[in-house]
Amino acid sequence: MLQIFNIPGKIKIWGISFNPIKKSEFIEVIDSHISAQTGNPLHITGVNPETISQSLNDPELRAAINDSDLVNIDNTLVLLMLRLSGVKAPERVATPDLFESMLDLAHKQEYSVFFLGAKEDIVYQAIVNIKSQFPGIKIAGYRNGYFIKEEVNEVLSAIRESKPDMLFLALPTPDKELFIQEYKHSLGVSVLLGIGGAIDVKAGLVKRAPLFLRRIGFEGIHRAMQNPSNYGKRYFTLYPAFVGFVIKELLKKHNI
């Protein structure tokens, strides 16, 4: 699919694959892939400082990212560090923004969507708000993210039976990445994207950071300050770990 639009293939750095392309190109590929009805899943993963830090010590997570068809640069800090490392990346493609554009695409093209993850009241309110924003959008179904191992087959059956074009997973890292990696070929879904906390934004539970904070890579920090019990510890440990790792890689590259 990438060759259709002459989109640059993946680059690999820090042991992680990226697609340094524009959001509009992601949407073109997604639309074309669903329209083609190939029967193959298009696996998209957003990568931010938290994901990269976790992947350094989690080979299964790293494998799930690298096996994705498209990997979006989900954070400005990652974008800046990539550019500092010599990667020509045109822009940040934040997962909440990609999610928004995919919902808009689904609405316009009458593609159906399914949501998996978050608490029952949160995913429900998010869908209410999405329906208000995109009247007539096809919601194939939803399921909260609180299920045990014995209920996985039931969850998988619900997704298969609803036959959505897009599956959005509002699960934490690495749960969403590993879920997609394990089941993407058995669900019959055209496009799969882990959206994590973007569902909280849609539900009105969390406000996105002001634009100037997004531009300097602090959107995650802003989210952590709004909900420190859930996000604070991860962000204030994994973000510095990411920066430290990249600095070490740069020093190593230049023999310093």
Image (spheres, rainbow, N blue to C red):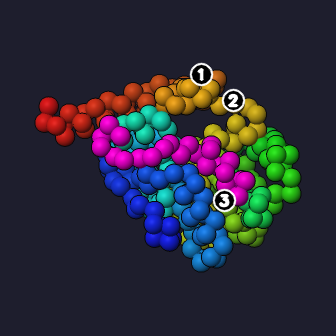
How far, Cα to Cα, is label 2 from label 3? 23 Å
Residue 103 appears at what percent x and percent y?
A: 71, 53
Q: Is residue 250 left or right of residue 208?
A: left
How far, Cα to Cα, is label 1 from label 3? 29 Å
Say which amino acid is labelled 2.
Lys
Closer-to-camera residue (54/222): 222
Picture mark count: 3
Say which amino acid is labelled 1.
Met
Q: In the image as oriented, which residue stretches furthest toward the left?
A: 255
Can residue 124 be seen in this snapshot? Answer: no
Q: Image quadrant for the C terminus?
A: top left
Verify whether residue 66 appears in magenta. Answer: no
Q: Quadrant of residue 121?
A: top right
Q: Is residue 189 left or right of residue 255?
A: right
Residue 35 appears at what percent x and percent y?
A: 66, 73
Residue 178 appears at what percent x and percent y?
A: 51, 55
Residue named by callout 1: 225
Magenta residues, as a range? 83-105
Q: Closer to the observer: label 2 or label 3?
A: 2
Residue for point 47% across, 53% down? 21
Verify whether residue 90 appears in magenta. Answer: yes
Closer-to-camera residue (67/229): 67
Q: Which mark is residue 167?
A: 3
Q: Is residue 184 above or below residue 115?
A: below
Q: Closer to the observer: label 2 or label 1?
A: 2
Q: Which mark is residue 207?
A: 2
Q: Is residue 72 above or below residue 229?
A: below
Residue for point 67% across, 61% down? 166
Element on which disc 3 rests? strand
Q: Quadrant of residue 232?
A: top right
